Image (cartoon, rainbow, N blue to C red):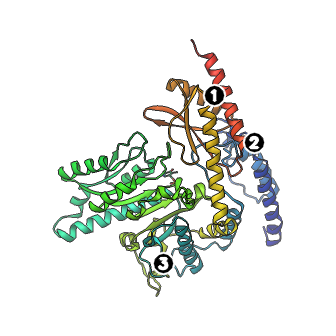
Amino acid sequence: MDVAEFRRRGKEMVDYVADYLEKIEERPVYPDLEPGYLRQLIPTEAPLEPEGFDEIMQDVERVIMPGVTHWHSPRFFAYFPAASSFPAMLADVLCSAIGCIGFSWAASPACTELETVMLDWLGKMLQLPDCFIAGTQGRGGGVIQSTASEATLMSLLAARCKAVRLIQAGDADRSEADILSKLVAYTSEQAHSSVERAALIGAVLMRKVPTDHCYAVRQETLKRMVEEDKAAGLIPFYFCATLGTTPSCAFDRITELGPLCNKENMWMHIDAAYAGSAFICPEFRPLLNGVEFADSFNFNPHKWLLVNFDCSAMWVRERADIIGAFKMEPLYLKHENQESGLVTDYRHWQIPLGRRFRSLKMWFVFRMYGLKGMQAHIRKQVSLAKEFESLVRADKRFEICAEVVMGLVCFRLKGSNELNQSLLKKITKSREIHLVPCQLSSRFVLRLAICSRSTESRHIQHAWRHITQLAFELLQEQPH
Ligand SMILES: *Cc1c(COP(=O)(O)O)cnc(C)c1O
């Protein structure tokens, strides 16, 4: 493909993408296929001779689209949203064109500097405490990680390193191996599985903290566990709080937990992967109170803030903690500028060396929506969730299973888990809408999350009509 063909095909691709998104609702939201479907549709070897672009695009419809779960369909209500917007998609094209690998300031100064400034912009939109803002002199600052899972892992590894150093500073004879074997981390029993995985990868013990009737971790519960563990000779060093849990969007009580973590010298990381985006709205910002006690904070603009995957925003109070834990400096990566708010070598903040120019997506989105446009997006999606909630509440056969705070509604048919499992099976099989379940207090619960940017009231009304129709059929089939 030469540059002339690229110009032509590029414009065709934009048209294809626009058509795809404009008419996405006409496609079944969830594919109807057996595993292994794709292998039968394409050759077993890569082609020897070059093929044409038209042939490939024909195969996109023949091979790919039938096997796509359409996350941006307004009939998709599963998991949590995957953010998407046109400005972000266009910025991604530019990112591919520049194609730099921004591991150090010198490797592409714009890539590093825009990221630092975008994380400051975003941190200010969230009204994060000053200690997290890089500015020009700051000791803290932000970084884009690929995913919340990596942000959690980074925070846990930094905390582990800090704990070992702190203990060795007071007791130089104590071996690292001995300390590591005594470290204990904590997180909610409702935390995302990636938190437990971080502890597995970081090779430390992690204990699950039971939650209250709202599925939130309370200070008394954590305090009791920390005291028990200290009495048993263990070293509590890390707590990962969740703001907006994956099953039910519950909020750990960080205003009470933060002071406890600070007093016990435990690193507090906050995982707000989904809910964090809503904190740009003043009415949701109180849920972030207590962040001033945190050592690190993370949320995913790629979930709910219109920036396409991947873009997970992480802030640390002390950049030295995170850099100190992982610094490696071979000669070929050295340059004469010193690490500060002005010069950052982001390779020290993450696991891979290479990194894309992801801050371009933020810059385009923040400027083309403005804070007001992004707030309007959040508010609209929350109001759609409230609309669905009121439909559920008006139907005596159903119940709401957790407070609806943001864009997630947890609900079920009053009755057995088996009944609700059958209802979800019918929903999945019909392919009209797509939902996933969760478990709350050993009950099987359906989760409806407002996901697509193009979801409107009519889609909520349609989803509810569809669910009640299937529920009606199911209840008819039940033996009385
Ligand atoms: C979605 C989610 C994650 C995982 O996010 P990734 O960016 O895919 O790693 C982690 N924690 C919570 C609370 C989530 O909702």
Count numbered badges in the picture. 3
Q: Quadrant of the C terminus?
A: top right
Q: CA distance from mark 3 to mark 1?
A: 52 Å
Name the disc covering residue 344, or none.
3
Which numbered disc flags the more N-terminal residue, 2 or 3? 2
The 10 Å Cα crowd at callout 1, few under 14, some 14 to 19, many 20 or more, is some
The quarter of the displayed image where residue 177 is located: bottom left
Residue where numbered disc 1 is placed? 426
Q: Please state if 89 lies on the left or on the right of 152 as rendered.
A: right
Q: Is residue 33 above or below residue 272?
A: above
Mark 3, residues whose alpha carbon is within 10 Å: few (<14), some, or many (≥20)? many
Residue at mark 2: 27
Q: Quadrant of the N terminus?
A: bottom right
- x%, y% of residue 415? 52, 23
Can the viewer see residue 67?
yes
Name the residue type under label 3.
Thr
Q: Residue at x 63, y 28 (%)?
A: 426
Instruction: Say whether disc 1 or disc 2 marks the residue closer to the N-terminus.
Output: 2
Q: Disc 2 versus disc 3: distance between alpha carbons? A: 45 Å
Q: Residue furthest top?
A: 480
| Callout 2 amino acid | Arg
